[in-house]
Amino acid sequence: MADARDGDAQLAVDRGSPVEGALFREALRHHGGGVAVVTVAAAEGPRGFTVTSLTAASLHPPLLSFYVNHDSRSWSALKAADQIGVHLLGAGHRDLAALFARRGADRFAPPTRWRSGPGGVPLLADATIRIVCARREVVPVGDHFLVVGEVLGVERNGPGGDPLLYAHGEFGRWMPIGEAPGTPIDELDLADRVEW
């Protein structure tokens, strides 16, 4: 069994037994992520949920991806949808992110401001960036599905600002820490850095 402890103790790993879910979840609380809201049109009305797993997957072609839990109430609408709305949130959108993360909430009732976009995709009026994607691929991964979307359109809402982030079980904002002493950022060897 894998085990991680504070201090100088050795990390014990048992290749035949994965780490316990609670320990894994606690470890991931230390990995901050951007916050987005995914929306889809459905016969019973618009559906949406908050994600922190959004990733730019490819530039050519433009692809993004995110994960959704098998048990998500929005999953049936998402798997039936041809197009998906992805909304990047700013630091001022904490309440919007919390609303779309809350089970049982009426996410599209006031004060949520939204309109129907291409293909009927619900677009959130207050999101910093609105992206419309074609659902390209769905891959089962453990207790989640990985959803890959091909970006069809991007719409910016004003000048932007600090992105909304999530870490340690809380929402927060991005704050630069400056360059590493004596090393300009362009000279760092970040092998997986993608130049956009």
Image (cartoon, rainbow, N blue to C red):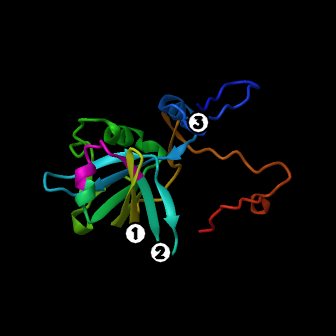
Q: Amino acid at mark 3?
A: His
Region rendered in magenta: 67-77
Task: Work out whether residue 154 can be spotted.
Answer: no
Can residue 119 be found in the magenta stretch?
no
Residue corresponding to mark 1: 150
> Three-letter amino acid code at disc 1?
Glu
Give the residue pinned by disc 2.
Answer: 61
Local packing at callout 2 (Cα closer than 10 Å; few below 14, some 14-19, many 20+) is few
Point out the tag, 1 or 3, that comes first from the N-terminus.
3
Q: Amino acid at mark 2?
A: Pro
Compared to 25, does 175 lie above or below? Answer: below
Q: Badge 3 is on which residue?
A: 30
Residue 83 left/right relative to 16 = left
Are there few (<14), some (14-19), or many (20+) residues within 10 Å of tag 1?
A: many
Residue 3 sits in quarter: top right
At horizontal 31% and vertical 61% (from top left) the residue drawn is: 84
42 vs 187, left or right, is left
Q: Are marks 3 and 2 in contact (CB under 8 Å)?
A: no
Q: Earlier in the sequence, mark 2 or mark 1?
A: 2
> Which residue extends farthest left?
44
Residue 144's place in the image compared with 186, above or below, is above
Where is 164 relative to 2, above or below? below
Query: What is the quadrant of the C terminus in the image?
Result: bottom right
